[in-house]
Amino acid sequence: MATQVLVLTNLYAYEKGLNRALEAAKLADAGMNVVFLIDPGSVADIVRGLGQQGWLGSGALRNLETSMLEGYRALATDILQEAQSRFSQAGIAVETNVKEMSPQKYIQELLNQKPTTVMVSGSSSLAGKLEKMLGQIEWIEEE
């Protein structure tokens, strides 16, 4: 695995993260591991909220949650294919994968592996959840 890791967390705002990771890989003359992180807990919270508001029954809630996760996986795969293409065109070795777990847990696991660089791209709401780790990662705020 590359010692530089980019963690993408937003299906609709990831360009800044990809651009920063490409720049870092070129400067370090090293490969990059690009991970798209899906937080199943966030999806469950959204779906649970719809149920609590009376919009959906329990069967529909399970189906919606399953469908949302499948959709996120498909979009994440598309984004990682774009990352693969961009890094390959730049002549940079890249590994890509999708992970499903809480951002706090996954990033702590990464930090325990002691990579040279961990970049995390996400929204300001995610920054609050990662507050204790911000000194150990390179935070890339996406709009």
Image (spheres, rainbow, N blue to C red):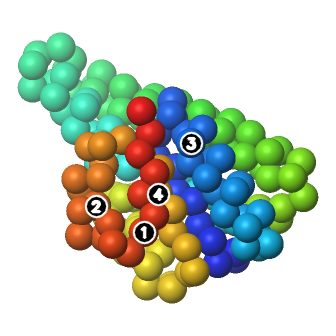
**Badge 3, how many Cα within 10 Å: few under 14, some, many 20+?**
some
Left or right: where 120 falls relative to 63: right
Asked whether the residues under the numbered discs 4 and 1 touch, taking CB atoms below 8 Å apart as contact, a structural biologist would say yes
Image position, residue 102 (x, y; %): 34, 58
Residue beneath the point at 44% across and 79% down: 111
Residue beneath the point at 42% across and 57% down: 139
Q: Distance between the residues labelled 4 and 3?
A: 11 Å
Q: Looking at the image, is mark 3 or mark 1 earlier in the sequence?
A: 3
Q: How far apart are marks 2 and 3 (CA)?
A: 19 Å
**Badge 4, how many Cα within 10 Å: few under 14, some, many 20+?**
many
For the question of whether residue 100 can be seen, the reply is no
Q: How far apart are marks 4 and 2 (CA)?
A: 10 Å
Q: How far apart are marks 4 and 1 (CA)?
A: 7 Å
Number of the label disc, if any, that sits on residue 16? 3
Residue beneath the point at 69% across and 57% down: 23
Q: Name the residue under label 2.
A: 130
Circle nearer the viewer, 1 or 2:
1
Asked whether the residues under the numbered discs 4 and 2 touch, taking CB atoms below 8 Å apart as contact, a structural biologist would say yes
Name the kind of residue labelled 4 in the image. Answer: Val
Name the kind of residue labelled 3 in the image. Answer: Lys
For the question of whether residue 140 can be seen, the reply is yes
Q: In the picture, residue 49 is in which quadrant? A: top left
**Badge 2, how many Cα within 10 Å: few under 14, some, many 20+?**
some
Number of the label disc, if any, that sits on residue 137? 1
Question: Could you tell me which secondary element the residue under label 4 belongs to?
Answer: strand
Number of the label disc, if any, that sits on residue 120? 4
Q: Looking at the image, is mark 1 or mark 2 earlier in the sequence?
A: 2
Q: In the picture, residue 16 is in which quadrant? A: top right
Question: Could you tell me which secondary element the residue under label 3 belongs to?
Answer: helix
